[in-house]
Image: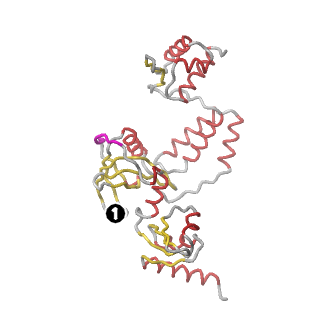
Amino acid sequence: MLDTSARLLKLLSLFQAHRDWSGPELAARLGVSTRTIRNDVERLRSLGYPVNATPGVAGGYRLGAGAALPPLLLDDEEAVAVAVGLGRATGGGVEGIEESSVRALAKLEQVLPSRLRRRVSALNAYTVQMPGPAPSVRPEVLTTIANAARDRERLRFDYTGHDGEQSVRDVEPYRLAHRRGRWYLVCYDVARADWRTFRVDRVRPRPPAGPRFTPRELPEDGDVAAYVEKGVNTAMWRHRATVLLHAPVEEMRALKHLLEFEPVDDATCLAHLGGDDLFRMAVWIGFLGVDFEVLDPPELAEQVLLLADRYRRAAGPR
């Protein structure tokens, strides 16, 4: 049997790993009586841990939120995961998070056992972060959106479209998604009676939160990643294009680019895509590795010709 100090640490770890516990469950985990569990809970409370208890058959214990952050008890893999996550967070994406992440990582590395410190140091030392042009997002915007989604409360915000147009949106927030350095809000737009995806760096919330709502069923069978990919690849960009690909639709879908492909016949298909820069779109289409024809817009076809001439000059005389 564990001594009292070790048992309290184990009990605290169980509370942090799982939200609700019944007395008999905790007693079975620790190999003690339910009376001992009650005494240990009182000891944790005397140390400042807000352990809430609910009486009755369906009752149990839960670690509540206190005035100060309690010590977190992490196993080896959890500690490495947190340290690596903090190291990645220093690359940006959330405004002001870099400095906070560095401070937190320094505190964690100071108390890591040497065997774990070497693993984390090696991974961070031999990993190169590739900073991108993605804009940062203020942490309070993310938390405002996340809290509204959690509490199922409508959210009003000012939004700046890719063309600079300002609008006020009233939405039912569903999920936040992080893709390639950018944050996106997946939500149901009440005024437009349809699902929408918004870039969070263009969102300015208007508190307070609105009335509560009943969650709706997301398209794409509830697959947030697939829905965001489809929105990012088409509707959210300044330019949209349709390209005829000389390849079967099954072959293109197997590449898992998550573009919207539409079959034409057994040998060709249409690809619908979008982007903020036509020249970059022309370059990207070449990555598909198949012959293609630009159907729309004509400005994209002009960029493809420009790119072809540049490649032809680079290859030299033949």
In the rendered structure, which segment of residues is drawn in magenta? 208-214
**Position of residue 199 measured from the top left corner of the image (x, y, whole percent):** 41, 55
Question: Is residue 12 covered in magenta?
Answer: no
Residue ID at (43%, 78%) = 299
Work out whether residue 89 or residue 14 is closer to the camera in this orientation and state it. 14
**Position of residue 14 measured from the top left corner of the image (x, y, whole percent):** 56, 25
With 23 as the anchor, is 218 left or right in this view? left
Q: Which quarter of the figure has residue 57?
A: top left
314, above or below 190, in the image: below
What residue is disc 1 on? 164
Label the magenta part by its dominant secondary structure.
loop
Q: Quadrant of the N terminus?
A: top right
Indicate the colouring scheme. Answer: secondary structure
With 176 as the anchor, is 78 left or right in this view? right
60, above or below 304, in the image: above
**Of the residues shown, which amino acid type is indicated by label 1?**
Gly
Q: Residue furthest front?
A: 266
**Position of residue 69 measured from the top left corner of the image (x, y, whole percent):** 49, 28
Residue ID at (58%, 43%) = 85
**Position of residue 35 measured from the top left corner of the image (x, y, whole percent):** 54, 10
Q: Residue furthest bottom?
A: 318
Secondary element at tag 1:
loop
Q: Quadrant of the C terminus?
A: bottom right
How many numbered circles does the render carry?
Answer: 1
Residue ID at (46%, 67%) = 273
303, above or below 96, in the image: below
The local crowd at label 1, few if under 14, some if 14 to 19, many if 20 or more residues have their Cα within 10 Å, is: few
Question: Is residue 213 covered in magenta?
Answer: yes
Work out whether residue 65 or residue 83 is closer to the camera in this orientation and state it. 65
